[in-house]
Amino acid sequence: MPTLFQINTSVNSCSHGRIAEEIGKLAIEQGWESYIAYGRANRPSVSHTIKIGTHWDIKWHGLETRLFDRHGLASKKATKDLIIQIEKIQPDIIHLHNIHGYYLNIEILFDYLAKANIPVVWTLHDCWGLTGHCSNFEFIGCEKWKTQCYSCPQIREYPASYFIDRSTKNYFLKKKLFTSVKNLSIIPVSNWLKDIVKFSFLAEYPIQVINNGIDTHLFTPMDGNAMRQKLGLINSFILLGVANVWKSRKGLDDFLQLSKELSNNCKIVLVGLSDKQLNKLPSNIIGIARTENVGQLAELYSVADLFINPTWEDNFPTSNLEALACGTPVLTYNTGGSIEAITPEIGFVVEQGDINGILNAVNIVKEKGKTYYSNACRERAVKFYNNEDRYQEYIDLYNKIKN
């Protein structure tokens, strides 16, 4: 029986955690044994799970990051213990997802991967693996990552450092470590990120785009009457936004601005807000805290008349796909890979910060009605972003490179 060993920040939580979970599930169905090693945020899984380090390891890693810009360079014992587990299990494939997040030591891990005769697949969910510090640079238009990072303009952004800028040292250390593995396949989840990788130090490796997938059985059109009653929005035109963390880069300020321009029958529902943010919302925005309840999310997507993703930096957001699968048209800014799932038949692409463009799209959907788009939305999601089809591409890749 072949064995798959995935490493990610979380298990079955957030988009990348659910992706790892669903890949493991499909692998098991096809005769593989599946393990997922994680740093935190584990939810029920069909795979064997292995916790990397402790709560205090993560705290110390965060402190080293804040003080010295040494993200990915703490958690030494935790990573050594992980390698002991890998050697016991002897997997046929090691699949990396997010290896940042205060839980892994990249020096120890990649020194091992460079020596171990195990094929490695690395899915890039963001740009952290290509830079000396940040996980995304689109918001500020930085291109230092193409040659070398220095004087990082985002040093206080995730993973924030408050005193020291090690971006140059980190850049060259990552370049050395990440190019030391011979049998490595790079999997960007969007064509936009593929083009980024081609200009990076990872360009020498095989690159294959595999789009994110979603469970189109869970994310499916649902009767929204109960949710409309619960929200007090029986006769309202509902605009929905969903994010794991809301900040300016995700479009929170744009939603606040949009709320000032909407007609009285339009209401905004935002999912994923913090307690502090919930207390500062205007009257025409209904806030909901972050939820792992997929059924609730599907109901919210279904009840919305238009899903709006005003993100200023993104790779290939699964929220767009989830909305489409629930029969809801999507509006996104012209940002990264966020536009790649959207066609004129199922949604809208407007330039970043174009509030008038959003208002025009709202009026179009009001005039035509959501049902004008719903069948096409659902059909595109099922045809192109069904998780079983997308993640079969990983199983096919595993079989190809392990032989």
Image: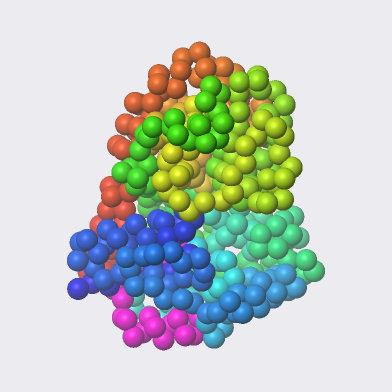
Who's the residue at 66% across and 55% down the image? 144
Q: Position of residue 87 (x, y in %)?
A: 36, 84
Coloring scheme used: rainbow
Most foreground residue, 273 or 308: 273
Q: Is residue 93 left or right of residue 280?
A: left
User: Residue 72 colored magenta?
Assistant: no
Who's the residue at 50% across and 31% down the image? 228
Most foreground residue, 219 or 392: 219
Q: Is residue 319 above or below residue 47?
A: above
Who's the residue at 31% across and 53% down the image? 391
Give the quadrant of the C terminus. Answer: bottom left
Q: Is residue 227 above or below residue 180?
A: above
Q: Residue furthest top?
A: 367
Residue 333 appears in the rendering: no
Q: Position of residue 13 (x, y in %)?
A: 47, 59
Q: Is residue 297 above or below residue 14?
A: above
Q: Is residue 399 left or right of residue 153?
A: left
Q: Position of residue 40 (x, y in %)?
A: 52, 69
Who's the residue at 44% across and 30% down the image? 225
Q: Is residue 99 left or right of residue 1?
A: right
**What's the magenta region?**
79-97
Most foreground residue, 207 or 99: 99
Residue 127 appears in the rendering: yes
Q: Which quadrant of the figure has residue 122? A: bottom left
User: Residue 83 colored magenta?
Assistant: yes
Q: Position of residue 253 (x, y in %)?
A: 70, 38
Most foreground residue, 339 or 53: 53
Q: Residue furthest right?
A: 163
Number of residue marks: 0
Q: Is residue 93 left or right of residue 68?
A: left
Give the quadrant of the N terminus. Answer: bottom left
Q: Which quadrant of the figure has residue 127? A: bottom right
